[in-house]
Amino acid sequence: MFNADVFQVTVAQQVLDISVRNANDRVLFIVRFPDKRPELVLTRLMNLYNKKVWTSIPKGRMSEAQLIGPEIVRHFKSLK
Amino acid sequence: MCVYNGQRVTKVEFIELKKLEKAIKDIDALKRPVVNAIECAPLAVIKPTADKTNFDIVTMEWSFLPTNVRNRTHAKEFRKKYDTENAKGEELLLIDEKGKEKMFRRSALEGRCLIISDRYYEWRHIYRKNKRTGENLKTPDKYPYQIMVKDRPYFYIAGVYNNWTDQDTGENVDTIAMVTTAANELAAKVHNSKERMPTILPDDLAWEWAMQDLTEQRITQLATYQLPHELMVAETINKKFQKNPTELPYLVSYPEIEKLDNPGLFKPAQMALF
């Protein structure tokens, strides 16, 4: 039995808890903030130019998605 | 062409994203601190890309299904009959006397991956004495433990996966087995009925396991790697922790059993993220 997939990234001097989940065959990153902001669910969409772009699900928190998403990528790249 | 969150996307992608919005309304069901293989629950996994230059983080269904399992009905029967949640590291690559490959061999060669985890759970068996005869009772008392790696918010466990297709419905899913090895000193005291533990790999070996082409000898070396017990910590937890998988287990002291000698620096509050 396992409790899987929690890690942390630091964005704007805040440590965010990130958990990885899956829904509809897509990977979701659920972000929890140390302040009172509600949870943020992130995934990457493929835009018309075949570029992967971070987005919130549902819509509306794109600026946070674009700020936190690259840190998630950086986190996993750093594991190499 | 459609727009989602300011991004121009295809209609297909747009529909997928809208479906996802609906799906995450049920996300609470996915926030499970306790994952149990019996339910074939999803595990978060690092899966290398085909060219092994990068990786994706995906979820996989826990309990390996080989390709010759035809459909979900067959899968259910198969899983009742065979324990494929774990794969013994020592036996991954075996070929039987008739030259037939064992179930995990192909995946050990071509489908190595890493389970991302922050702890695992095991049961310690304690046999009380029969007051009259002084012999052990036949049925042990079982005490649950959570086992973690010191100073690591999460760690990697070697896994092998197979991309399985239901031949009736076309459903396609990655199914995974966790690689196990002989228990180290601490894990053997906890899992004293089988003396096995997950193959937990340090970062450099984890990368090698998942991302590099390896000889069979090296695969077995890594699959049987035993994390030193000094790096691990084990704590007793509440016995009914599996009953409520949406809540983290909590630490419980059982005065009737001998404490394990595993001084650690683990701070539970850091782990209570769900």
Image: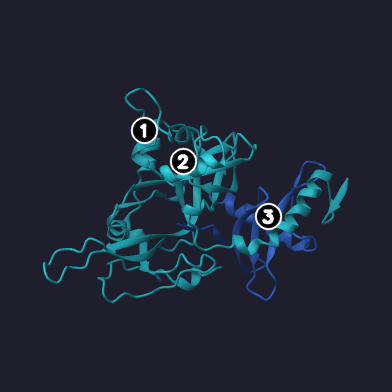
Chain colours: A blue, B cyan
Residue B26 visible in the snapshot: yes
Label 2 to label 3: alpha-carbon separation:
42 Å
Disc number lying in front (2 or 3): 2
Q: Nearer the viewer, residue B99 or B14?
A: B99
In the rendered image, which quarter contains the N terminus of chain A? bottom left
Side of B157 where A45 appears, left or right: right
Q: Which residue is mark 1?
A: B217
Q: Residues within 10 Å of mark 1 (few under 14, many from 20)?
A: few
Both labels 1 and 3 in a single chain: no
Task: Report whether residue A80 is seen.
Answer: no
Where is residue A73 shown, x and y percent of the image? 64, 52
Badge 3 crowding class, 10 Å Cα cut-off, few under 14, some 14 to 19, many 20 or more, is few
Which quadrant of the figure has residue B265?
A: bottom left
Please tell me which residue is depicted at 76% across the width and 44% down the height of the picture: A51
Question: From what the image shows, is residue B247 above or below residue B62?
Answer: below
What is the residue that sits farthest to the left in this orientation?
Answer: B133
Q: Quadrant of residue A69?
A: bottom right
Residue indicated by mark 2 = B78
Residue type at the position of mark 1: Gln
- Which residue is at a point 74% across and 58% down the rendered structure image? B22
SS at badge 3 = helix
Where residue A70 is drawn, which disc sits there?
A: 3
Host chain of mark 1:
B
Say which of B169 and A62 sits in front.
B169
Q: Residue at x 71, y 51 (%)?
A: A44
> What amino acid is at disc 3?
Pro
Task: Give left or right: position of B263 versus A63.
Answer: left
Q: Secondary structure at mark 1?
A: helix
